[in-house]
Image (cartoon, helix red, strand yellow):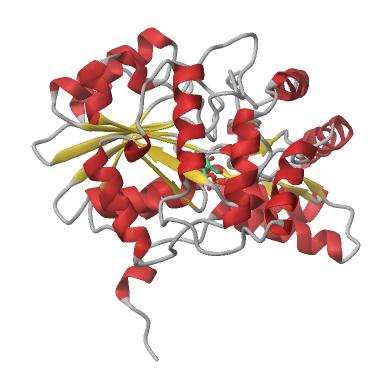
Amino acid sequence: MSLAQRINRIQPSATLEMTALANSMKAQGIDVIGLAAGEPDFDTQDHVKEAAIAALRQGFTKYTPVGGTNDLKEAICEKFQRENGVSYKPAEVTVSCGAKHSLYNLFQVLFEAGDEVLIPSPYWTSYPDMIVLTDAKPVIVSSTMESGYKINPEILKRHITPKTKALILNSPSNPTGVAYSPKEIKDLVQTAMDHNLTIISDEIYEHITFEGFQQQCVAALGEEVKKRTLTVNGPSKTYAMTGWRIGYLAGSAEIVSAVTKLQGQSTSNPTSIAQKATVAALKGPQDEIRRRCQEFERRRNVVVEKLRTMPGVSVVKPDGTFYAFPRFDGAFGKRYGDKVINSSGDLATYLLKEAQVVTVPGDAFGDDRALRLSFATSMEIIEEGLKRIGTELQKLS
Ligand SMILES: Cc1ncc(COP(=O)(O)O)c(C=O)c1O
């Protein structure tokens, strides 16, 4: 039986593949250090779990409205008002099975053959493939490590054509951890507005920031910007709820309703009890987020400090997230046995085989000289992983 062409046009998710590999090596009893995970190592908080248990006991186990319950939409609107100063109505919000699903649905509803979509690089690995699935063209807007992995209006303008339909922003960024300042965001958004682009702002890491950094919510930049912006967010990273599969989208009621229509012919509603749990997360105490960020910040400091002692390795200090995206220029062209390191995949494989350290090759994020290291794991594992990486790099000749 033959497969449809579209499935051959996309790659498997590199992050999920490397995480699965780490788990299977662990299950075989191999002493693996996993630095690939894209999720907080903390548990979902008890009051959130209790809300799901109560929902189960109350028989809240049936279909809900396709785009989420009113309770949850109202909790999301309250969140936008309280945290971002943006006023959305429930009709401008739709809830899906994870932020990934919100983005997928949104792209399906907005893009088609002939459209171009701007993606600043390094980028979250799923954006280009999701855009390819709509038949639109992902246009990569490259930044350099020297510019702190940030693009600017000049660079952006060079990639805008009459076919450009949208710009995707993701600050703080997966994989670099770099976040745009309010002024930088404003300038990029102004450029997008000047060219009548739709702005898709993936704000899933907005709360995982360091040294008091406050992420600017794009839609909060004014009514005109809000009209052109679709904000994507969800509880996965902020509340350590990756497995619950809830994400949401806020923007024009017309687009939101189109997304809900698509969802009504595919997955229908996200899980009923996960919706109740998300209401509890959004409305409950918020102080744990700060405490967890402080722990991520402590780990970030160790990761950056240790990487910077390694010859031939450079890294931009992350402003947020739980990732670092070091470049390993010194390792390229070097040998081990009869093999030469020529790509991020070669390097990740070398580290996996020789040091049992799992990382994600940078080419999945648009930089083939980098690896993504996750510090969403204990300090002990981070220190051991970095020690092993340092030792293996020295063995290259
Ligand atoms: C930038 C970015 N956007 C969206 C997502 C998807 O999150 P969710 O688990 O809610 O689908 C992720 C998850 O890794 C991410 O890193």
Determine whether, in the image, residue 275 is placed left or right of residue 141: right
Q: With respect to residue 384, does 358 lie above or below? A: below
* Residue furthest left as drawn: 162
Q: Position of residue 327 (x, y in %)?
A: 58, 31
Residue 21, how many percent across, how many down?
A: 71, 60
- In the rendered view, does 18 fall on the left or right side of 70? right
**Residue 319 versus residue 310: which sits nearer the camera?**
319
Q: Is residue 368 left or right of residue 326?
A: left
Residue 64: x and y, percent? 49, 57
Q: How many marks?
A: 0
- Residue 369 falls in which quadrant of the image? top right
Give the residue displayed 91% in from the left and 62% down from the top.
Answer: 29
Whether 64 is drawn above or below 83: the answer is below
Residue 368 showing in the rendered view: no
Q: Residue at x 13, y 26 (%)?
A: 195
Closer-to-camera residue (134/60): 60
Which of the 4 image quadrants contains residue 263?
A: bottom left
Residue 52, image x and y in percent?
70, 49
Q: Residue furthest front?
A: 58
Is residue 169 among the parts visible in the rendering?
Answer: yes
Identify whether 315 is placed above or below 41. Answer: above
Residue in view at x 58 percent, y 42 percent = 333
Image quadrant holding the N terminus, namely: bottom left
